[in-house]
Image (cartoon, rainbow, N blue to C red):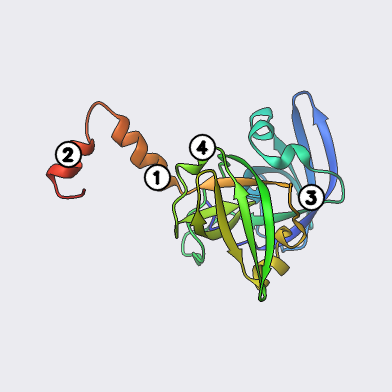
Amino acid sequence: MFTGIVEGLGKVIRLTKKGADLVLEVEAEMDLSEVSLGDSIAVNGACLTVTYQNGKIFSADVSAESLSKTTLKYLRTGQQVNLEKSLRIGGFLGGHFVLGHVDGIGRILSRTQKSGSIIFAIEAVDSLSRYIVEKGSVAIDGISLTVNRLEKERFYVNVIPHTAAHTTLTGKKEGEWVNIEADILGKYVEKLLQSKQGIDKDFLAEHGFI
């Protein structure tokens, strides 16, 4: 479990193919003294398990499934990534609950400077966009952001100067791909509504929810 508040950047120092999987080695800017083998770290929003750690360097296995669903397959040596250690009980929740289970990838359609902020328009396929709501939360490359505006298969987010300066979004350009994780609440509601037993639209109407 994460919050979508990036704690620091990391630099990819090695990528090693392991069959259909990948071993990712990263040098982190942030303190890893509390990180142990088996702990979780979000890399560009994807939850990975630490398999090696020495000082500020850690390694993690990336499965074929994770590669197929995320932008981790596009990583190159020397590239920067967003990092966040897993949320600990009693920790500060500054963003929203992020699982690190990336739903899919989206393409940056436009990048517009507005005063000190940057407005990104991001394309999301219908299977993702149905979970994205105006003024709701979304994680982009592991960053908790608010959806400003929503259109059919695109949505807009505002990135303030601090967020841009301390994440990889500052260097993102039109046409690049990003990881998207929608708020988990919408997926659970949809699942319940589709169930033949339990909660459905009639139940919600009967009890005054709709």
Left or right: residue 70 compared with residue 138: right
Would you name the residue on which mark 1 appears?
A: 186
Q: Look at discs 4 and 2 and give the one toward the viewer.
A: 4
Of marks 4 and 1, which one's residue comes earlier in the chain? 4
Would you name the residue on which mark 3 appears?
A: 26
Give, as a three-letter code, the residue at label 1: Gly
Q: Quadrant of residue 206?
A: top left
Residue drawn at the location 69% of the way across and 28% of the way down: 64
Instruction: Report if the CB atoms under discs 4 and 1 are less than 8 Å apart.
Output: no
Of marks 3 and 2, which one's residue comes earlier in the chain? 3
Cα–Cα gap, marks 3 and 2 = 50 Å
Instruction: Report if the CB atoms under discs 1 and 2 are less than 8 Å apart.
Output: no
Of marks 3 and 4, which one's residue comes earlier in the chain? 3
Cα–Cα gap, marks 3 and 4 = 33 Å
Give, as a three-letter code, the residue at label 3: Val
Q: Quadrant of residue 18?
A: top right
Nearer-the-camera pick, 14 or 201: 201
For mark 4, does the 10 Å Cα neighbourhood hold few (<14), some (14 to 19), or many (20 or more) residues? few
Give the answer, above or below, for where 56 lies relative to 114. Answer: above
Q: Which mark is residue 126?
A: 4
Of marks 3 and 1, which one's residue comes earlier in the chain? 3
Residue drawn at the location 56% of the way across and 38% of the way down: 125
